[in-house]
Each structure stands twice: as structure tokens, then as C-alpha cells.
């Protein structure tokens, strides 16, 4: 589940809209179900591969989107 440090799912969805990328696009590109993309964005699923792809497609560092996961690994 997202915490106070991670980007809000609404912000991620807004960034996808701004980048003209749909959740279906991401699912096709990664050969995963659209539900998997939804779960990762909502913070109910964890997939490093999906997270990194989302970050790449919206042009935001994955550590900025999910700092609770990626910054604690560096500490």
C-alpha cells in the first residue's frame, strides 16, 4: 500500500495522461495484464519491472515515484 512518501496514484495517472500513455499501453509493452499495471500504480502490487517501466515512460525517476522502496535499498 502506498505511504506518505510515495507518489499518490492520482499523480502517477496524471503523469501517464501528460505523457500520452495508457495503462493498456503499458500492459501491452510489458506483456502483463492491465490489472497488474493498475495494482502497481495503486500500491497493491509490487513489480520492479513494471515500476521501472512506468517511471521510464513518464520520465520520472523511479526513486521519486516509490521512494519507500528504492531509497531504503540504498541506505
Image: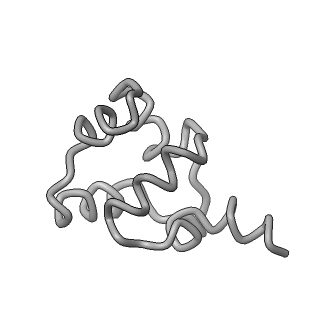
- Give the vertical position of 6 relative to 26 (above or below): below
Q: Quadrant of residue 60?
A: bottom left
Q: Quadrant location of the N terminus?
A: top right
By what rule are the colours in the image chosen? one colour
Q: Is residue 73 left or right of residue 25?
A: right
For residue 15, above or below residue 46: below
Residue at the spot 44% in from the left edge and 30% down from the top edge: 36
Q: How many marks?
A: 0
Q: Residue at x 53, y 66 (%)?
A: 62
| Quarter of the image that includes the C terminus | bottom right
The residue nearer to you, when weighing 56 against 3, is 56
Q: Quadrant of residue 8?
A: bottom left
Residue furthest toward the right?
75
Left or right: 27, with 45 as reference point:
left
Image coordinates for residue 45, horizontal then vertical, percent: 56, 36
- Residue depicted at x 50% and y 66%: 65
Residue at point 33%, 29% (across, down): 34
Q: Is residue 3 left or right of residue 57?
A: right
The image position of residue 38, as x and y in percent, is 38, 36
Q: Please, is residue 54 above or below residue 32 in the view? A: below
Which of 53 and 67 lies nearest the eye of the viewer? 53
Amino acid at each position: 500500500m502506498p505511504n506518505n512518501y510515495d507518489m499518490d496514484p492520482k499523480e502517477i495517472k496524471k503523469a501517464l495522461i501528460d505523457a500520452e500513455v495508457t495503462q493498456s499501453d503499458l500492459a501491452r509493452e510489458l506483456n502483463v495484464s492491465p490489472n497488474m499495471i493498475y495494482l502497481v500504480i495503486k500500491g497493491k502490487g509490487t513489480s520492479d519491472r513494471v515500476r521501472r517501466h512506468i517511471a521510464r515512460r513518464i520520465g520520472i525517476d523511479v526513486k521519486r515515484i516509490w521512494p519507500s522502496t528504492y531509497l531504503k535499498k540504498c541506505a
